[in-house]
Each structure stands twice: as C-alpha cells, then as structure tokens.
Image (cartoon, rainbow, N blue to C red):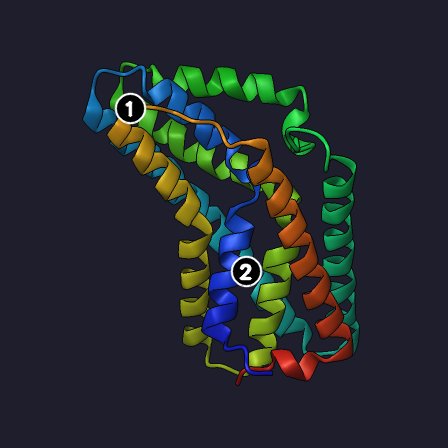
Amino acid sequence: KTFSLPVLTVVIGLLDGFNPCAMWALLFLITLLLGLENRKRMWLLGSLFIVASGAVYFVFMAAWLQLLLFLGMITAIRVIIGLVAIGAGGINLREWWLSRKAEALACKVSDLKDTKKTFEKIKTIVYRRSLWWAIIGILILGFSVNLVELACSAGFPAVYTQVLALSGLPMWQRYLYMVAYIIFYMLDDLVVFMIAMVTLKSKMVGGKYAKYSALIGGILMLLLGLLLILKPQWLMFG
C-alpha cells in the first residue's frame, strides 16, 4: 500500500532489464566491436544498438497502453493480464527450479537455429566498410532482435502498462513514467557496454545472473499478477 509508482518503475524496469534473453545479441555485438580499430565506430554502433532496443520497447509499451485505454478498464482485461503475469512468473520459477543445480540458465528463444543466422548478419553489419550502411544495419538489427526477444519478458511490460492504465494519471505523465522504465530497463546493457568499451574486454553474463534473475523476476510477476486480480486498488497510484 505504501509502494510508490516511481519505486515500482525502478524495480520492474531493472528486473526486466536483467532478462538474459535480451542481452545475448549485445554481448555478441560487443565481442565483434572489440575487434575494430576505430574506437569512435565502436562507440557509435554499440550506442545505436542500445537506443534502437529501447525504442522498440517504448513503442511496444505505448501501443499496449493505448490498447488498454481504448478497451476501457473492464475487469476481464485486468484479470487476463493478471493471469498472464502469474503464468509468466510460474514459467520463470519452473525454469529456475529445473536448472537450480546447473551452472547456467539458457534462454529458449535464443536457442533457435535462426540465432546462427543472426550472428552472421551481425558480423556482416559490423564489418561493413560504409559507416552509413553499418548504422542502418545496426538500427534494423536492434529493432528486429528486441522485437523477437519480447517473448522472453512480455509479462513485465504488460503488467506495468496495466498499472499505468489504472493510475488515473494524465497521458503525458504516463509517457514520462514509460521513458523512466526504459532507462532502467536499458541500464544493465549500458553498464556492460561501457565497461567493455573502456576496458576493451567482453565478459559473458554468468549462469548465476540468469538463474537469479529468473527467480526474482518470477516471484515479482507472481505477486503483481495476484495483486491485479485480488487487490487492484493497491496498484492505483493516482
């Protein structure tokens, strides 16, 4: 009852960002960028990829919010989103439980055969002679990869936009909160990218990172899903 919307924005945004599925492409991109001699090109391409990734998420959340507001605050929608959050949280906890003794937790979406094709596309883009074609390729890559990877963590943005819809805030404030959400969502990517560029080293995300993000994220999605169904008034911050 005492949880503020800004705190909820920070917490859900950070946990959503710690999804290992959303970082695999960035880590592979960093590995290739470290092989370039042009430092400016390294910073430019990596930064554009992160900006494009955040833009995809913002567009998705804005469209979802508009859909919720268009359909109206009917109980059925709130319950459905709550059930989706509970289901997503349960899947995360199940994956954590099944891999609790393993060293790493793999993202099933990133295990598809298309991943190899994506790796080859990233290589082609990074090593293009034309900077403008490389920039265009990186932007398209950021949009396409993160659109697919939304399948890993669609529960978090769906729940958060539902909370915004219930808040009764003016539209401009809702959009500001979404921008703040995106900033915290991209924070871990920014930190990893900046450390790699400054130290010229790339360290892959360890198994503990993936497992504990699945555990904590699963618990939070379960709790938020239950609140949406049983105590929606606790999530009305307006």
Q: Amino acid at mark 1?
A: Leu
In the rendering, at what x and y percent does residue 190 appear? 36, 43
For residue 50, above or below residue 155? above
Relative depth, front residue between 31 and 136? 31
The residue positioned 58% from the left and 66% from the top of the image is: 161
Q: Which mark is residue 16?
A: none
For residue 207, above or below residue 161? above
Query: Which of marks 2 and 1 precedes in the sequence?
Result: 2
Helix, strand or loop at disc 1? loop
| 1 or 2: mark nearer the eye | 1
The residue positioned 39% from the left and 35% from the top of the image is: 139
Relative depth, front residue between 139 and 54? 54
In the rendering, at what x and y percent does residue 19 appear? 57, 44
Q: Amino acid at mark 2?
A: Ile
228 relative position to 139: left or right: right
Count of numbered badges drawn on the protein = 2
- The answer to whether marks 1 and 2 mark residues whose Cβ atoms lie closer than 8 Å is no
Q: Which residue is mark 2?
A: 12
The quarter holding residue 137 reads top left
Residue 59 in view here: no
For residue 233, above or below residue 226? below
Residue 145 in view here: yes
Relative depth, front residue between 190 and 118? 190
Q: Which residue is mark 1?
A: 200
